[in-house]
Image (cartoon, rainbow, N blue to C red):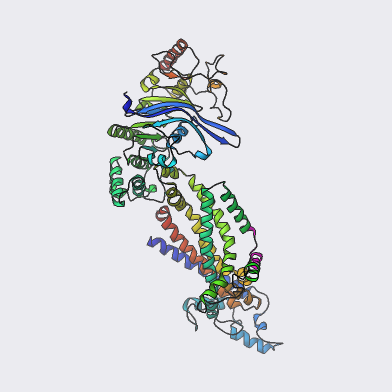
């Protein structure tokens, strides 16, 4: 088990390194236009441009820049570890900017993930057990609705109905839990539900299909032949074996949302990581974009590792192969 | 056979599955009995209804999607009309089942010992350690070497034969009255097959139970069964004591089965396959279900269903229109041919 985790850890580091390289090439090398122009004010002289290029390190060849970037990433820079550099716009530390925005996105994801996991899996189990019943058809109808509803439309509808018309929830904008706990929940509940709906629908379908497949297995018949109660058969024997695809998807979905909850963030004006990245991209403030992408990549690699470890705990066959 | 040895009395068991294409009648009017110390061999091709009838007895068919009629009397109670919860209390306790494919029948994510211990706690309120102890004890009983440590293994660490032993151990947890073995050796190597059959026989003698042995392998039945029921297209074709059925089979289908079975004496080129294939149970042929493939069919066969009766008092039951003297003559001819081959 230890060797397994160690091997996965080395692999993860390698993946992060390559993501870093690609991020670097894409964001420092490919975009057209000299970023220095954007930060040099109106009609700069060539000398001013050269000074800016020198200050931002843009006059060096790309591989030297990359070397410095990755060196700083692993060893840290004057803002500490990991070194992500400073923004072109203000010279502020990229890390501090990300740290300021990250809690909003992470709390959005955490709440939504909790909701969609509980709701999605419950609905999935219910419709698998009551297959072809009204409950099953209603839940699969809900799933179809959830999967086909665009997030921006759903978010706006939520705001219109539950904030503007009914006044049950807080509107757009972010309230920090350190400021006001009730304010935090009242403002987060709509984004949570909006983001969770799509995933809950997807998870309900996945749980239903996976569980139905498992319930057709011979070892489920064995469990029934032992005289176990239907509850034990379904939850202990059925759900356990159906869990593997759900765990895989859950890890990946959470990781992808670190950089990918942009639409929900902007509908509800949460100004999280996605917002930071989009804003900086339009400003050609490339270190911030690179920082967010890097964070998202690390999240994916890290969640992959967690999923693999969980796998080994769920399925003993993985441990020995 | 005195009556207090009687365990199971099945009468007119019929199982229908309504499907989108029509009703599939998988089992039709099957009747048999099982007593303590008896091994009933149920033989037939795939799809002859042998597994389905046992699943019906165990209550393992989805009642909402199957129509089951008839009587299955076990210790004075009709299992078919029993409340699902009462049936669950019998399942695994008084009637236990061993299935065909030991590779698929154990849960891949739980330890073998835990799965057996779970069978203990399903019917008995005992502490976990006691249940585990019982699991180890049974694994040892069915011949798993080093049982205390092997109980901690997962099924994929067991060989096929060991898994089937574990399944048998699981079935024996509550000293059941009836052990139903559904093709217990089909997925196993020949040498392992013999060991498993021997184990089942041992267990039967030791606990004085009744065994139903479902198989399509006549060799298996010949080795262990005390009575034999031959099934075809969901119906009983022939039913009687094993010695009689093997010495003097009465039904052309049974002849076909025996002639298509390779043995040391029967070389492969001397085998006679049964022409054609089993009928669709969606639209079974009228009359005798075997008549389209039967080389001896005559007028009544395509229209009249032959009843399961003993043609003469000294014979066992069969469902065939052929007159008794014809059966005897054809049977003899068959025997001579076999001796010549």
| Residue in front for this viewpoint, B155 or A234 | A234
Q: Residue at x 40, y 56 (%)?
A: A319
Q: How many marks do you count on the picture?
A: 0
Compared with residue A155, is residue A86 higher up or lower down, i.e. above or below? below
Q: Which residue reaches farthest right?
A: A43
Q: Quadrant of residue A320?
A: bottom left
Q: Which quadrant is home to the N terminus of chain B?
A: top left
Instruction: Answer whether residue A151 is magenta in the image.
Output: yes
| Residue in front for this viewpoint, A51 or A111 | A111
Instruction: Answer whether residue B84 is magenta in the image.
Output: no
Location of residue B341 in the rendering, given as x and y in whole percent from the top left corner: 43, 18
Compared with residue A52, is residue B138 higher up or lower down, i.e. above or below? above
Q: Is residue A110 visible?
A: yes
Q: Residue at x 53, y 17 (%)?
A: B295
Left or right of A278? Residue B324 is left
Location of residue A228 in the rendering, given as x and y in whole percent from the top left corner: 40, 45
Location of residue A210 in the rendering, given as x and y in whole percent from the top left corner: 52, 51
Left or right of A156? Residue B14 is left
Please identify the dominant SS of the magenta region.
helix
Q: Residue at x 49, y 65 (%)?
A: A303
Location of residue B211 in the rendering, given as x and y in whole percent from the top left corner: 36, 31
Q: Is residue B261 visible?
A: no
Residue range (magenta):
A147-157
């Amino acid at each position: 088990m230890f060797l397994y985790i160690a091997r996965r850890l080395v692999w993860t580091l390698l993946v992060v390194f390559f993501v870093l390289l690609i991020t670097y090439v894409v964001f420092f090398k490919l975009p057209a236009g000299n970023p220095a122009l954007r930060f040099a004010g109106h009609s700069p002289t060539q000398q001013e441009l050269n000074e800016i290029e020198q200050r931002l390190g843009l006059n060096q060849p790309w591989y030297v820049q990359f070397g410095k970037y990755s060196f700083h990433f692993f060893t840290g820079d004057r803002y500490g570890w990991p070194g992500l550099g400073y923004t072109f716009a203000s010279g502020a530390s990229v890390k501090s900017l990300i740290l300021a925005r990250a809690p909003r996105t992470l709390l959005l994801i955490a709440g939504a993930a909790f909701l969609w996991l509980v709701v999605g899996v419950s609905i999935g189990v219910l419709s698998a057990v009551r297959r072809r019943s009204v409950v099953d058809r209603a839940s699969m109808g809900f799933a179809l609705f959830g999967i086909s509803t665009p997030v921006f439309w759903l978010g706006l509808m939520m705001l219109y109905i539950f904030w503007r018309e009914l006044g049950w929830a807080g509107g757009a904008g972010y309230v920090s839990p350190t400021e006001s706990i009730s304010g935090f929940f009242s403002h987060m509940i709509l984004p949570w539900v909006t983001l969770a709906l799509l995933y809950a629908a997807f998870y309900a379908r996945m749980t239903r299909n996976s569980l139905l497949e498992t319930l057709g297995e011979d070892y489920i018949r064995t469990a029934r032949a032992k005289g176990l109660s239907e509850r034990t058969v379904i939850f202990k024997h059925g759900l356990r074996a159906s869990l593997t695809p759900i765990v895989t998807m859950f890890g990946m979905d959470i990781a992808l949302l670190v950089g990918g909850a942009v639409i929900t963030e902007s509908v509800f004006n949460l100004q999280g990581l996605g917002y930071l990245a989009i804003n900086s991209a339009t400003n050609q403030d490339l270190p911030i974009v690179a920082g967010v992408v890097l964070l998202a990549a690390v999240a994916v690699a890290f969640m992959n590792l967690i999923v693999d470890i969980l796998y080994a705990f769920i399925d003993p066959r993985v441990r020995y192969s | 056979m005195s009556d207090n040895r009687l365990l199971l009395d099945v009468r007119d068991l019929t199982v229908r599955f309504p499907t989108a294409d029509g009703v599939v009648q998988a089992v039709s009017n099957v009747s048999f009995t099982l007593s303590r110390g008896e091994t009933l061999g149920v033989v037939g091709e795939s799809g002859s209804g042998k597994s389905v009838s046992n699943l019906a007895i165990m209550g393992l068919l989805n009642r909402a999607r199957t129509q089951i009629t008839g009587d299955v009397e076990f210790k004075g109670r009709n299992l078919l009309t029993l409340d699902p919860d009462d049936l669950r209390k019998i399942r695994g306790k008084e009637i236990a089942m061993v299935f065909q494919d030991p590779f698929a029948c154990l849960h891949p994510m739980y330890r073998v010992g835990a799965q057996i211990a779970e069978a203990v706690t399903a019917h008995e309120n005992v502490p976990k350690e006691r249940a585990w102890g019982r699991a180890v004890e049974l694994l040892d009983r069915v011949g798993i070497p080093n049982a205390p440590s092997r109980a901690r293994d997962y099924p994929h660490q067991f060989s096929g034969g060991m898994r089937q032993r574990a399944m048998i151990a699981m079935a024996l947890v509550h000293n059941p009255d009836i052990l139903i073995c559904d093709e217990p050796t089909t997925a196993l190597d020949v040498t392992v097959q013999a060991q498993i059959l021997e184990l089942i026989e041992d267990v039967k003698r030791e606990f004085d139970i009744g065994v139903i042995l479902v198989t399509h392998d006549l060799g298996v039945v010949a080795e262990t069964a005390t009575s034999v029921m031959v099934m075809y297209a969901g119906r009983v074709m022939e039913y009687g004591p094993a010695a009689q059925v093997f010495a003097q089979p009465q039904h052309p289908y049974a002849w076909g089965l025996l002639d298509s079975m390779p043995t040391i004496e029967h070389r492969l080129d001397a085998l006679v396959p049964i022409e054609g294939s089993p009928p669709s149970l969606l639209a079974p042929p009228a009359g005798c279900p075997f008549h389209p493939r039967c080389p001896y069919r005559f007028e009544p066969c395509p229209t009249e269903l032959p009843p399961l009766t003993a043609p003469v008092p000294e014979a066992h039951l069969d469902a065939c229109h052929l007159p008794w003297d014809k059966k005897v003559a054809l049977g003899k001819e068959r025997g001579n041919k076999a001796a010549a081959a």
